[in-house]
Image: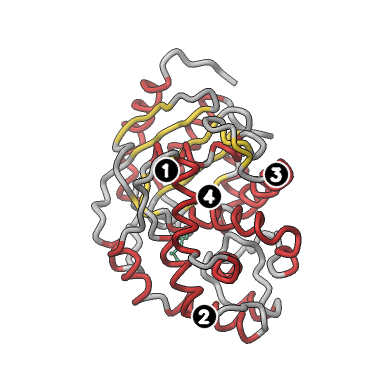
Amino acid sequence: MKQYQDLNTLLQQLLSQCQPLYSQGKVADYIPALAQVAPQQAAIAIATLDGNIYSAGAAEQHFSLQSISKIFGLVMAMNRLGDELWQRVNMEPSGQPFNSIVQLEWEQGIPRNPVINAGAILVADVLVSHYSASKTAFLTFLRRLIGIETIYADQQVYLSELEHGNRNAALAYLMKSFGNIEAEVPQVLEHYFHQCATAVNCQQLSRALLFLANRGVQPHSNEQICSRRDAHRVNAILSTSGMYDQSGEFAFKVGLPAKSGVGGAIVAIVPQFGVITAWSPPLNRFGNSVVAMQLISQLAEELGLSLF
Ligand code: DON
């Protein structure tokens, strides 16, 4: 990897170059609370395993995790259920949009992977069934990873998704009809929407995911968050499915495990180095942030971060 004297300056330069791309995307509006977010904002932050944080732009501005929450839910469910989880959800790329329904019926209610909506709802069912207060357990897990207590769900975003979550409800009821959801669907959806609505900033999110770049160990606390094998598995799933039906293009251009959310953030894991989070609300047709994708691709190219 190339060495940079001043990563903050490089991040600032990349951010200035990417800003003309705002107009190529559109803020998510199928969740009305997200449509209210000002589109022309961007930030990037890198947390490194040696404890440094580099950033540019609005790196302390909060946004909702949305689909990036699926990573944390998955790690919690893997820790609770072990290999049994993989009898209820697959690990193949879907090649379909993140909220697609058709494939789920063909495949008898077994989601293609845990980071499309159906898979994350399945994971939410595992959490609801294994924790007496799963929403609190999720927040506690994230607080522990970041090392601060003040992480909450954005109530407005949570209620907005609850009110407009018919498609996710359809996925959940379809899986229930195949016997692949154990708890009551409304409770599972409440957990799923609540974790999606969790608000963080770029610096916090990069820090939270460092264990995936460090074989399962959180460097600042030295705590084993998941096994080395599970850290490998999560990174594998993010590499093949984290950017949905744009995962192939992202691997082709960037070559890092990554996950996007419709809140406009994208995280990329750089094994043995650190975690990059970029955020900007306007999305492309795949539901991935236009500016965040460009920021991460340019940074990866500039620093030679690709795994391939
Ligand atoms: O369930 C949903 O549709 C949203 N809460 C999350 C979707 C999402 O973030 C997809 N990512 N690009």
Residue type at numbered disc 4: Lys
Residue type at numbered disc 2: Val
User: Quick check: is the Cβ at mark 4 less than 8 Å away from ligand 1?
Assistant: no
Q: In the structure shown, which secondary structural element does the residue marked by tag 1 occupy? A: helix
**Earlier-in-chain disc, 1 versus 2:** 2
Q: Image quarter for residue 18? A: top left
Residues marked 4 and 1 touching at CB (< 8 Å)? no
Q: CA distance from mark 1 to mark 2?
A: 33 Å
Direction from residue 10 to residue 210 in the image, left or right: right
Determine which residue is flagged by label 4.
Answer: 259
Q: CA distance from mark 2 to mark 3?
A: 30 Å
Determine which residue is flagged by label 3.
Answer: 227
Residue type at numbered disc 3: Ser
Residues marked 3 and 1 touching at CB (< 8 Å)? no
Few, some or many residues within 10 Å of mark 4 (<14, 14–19, 20+): many
**Earlier-in-chain disc, 2 versus 4:** 2
Determine which residue is flagged by label 2.
Answer: 185
Few, some or many residues within 10 Å of mark 1 (<14, 14–19, 20+): many
What residue is drawn where x is 36% and y is 21%? 9
Q: Is residue 42 above or below residue 135?
A: above
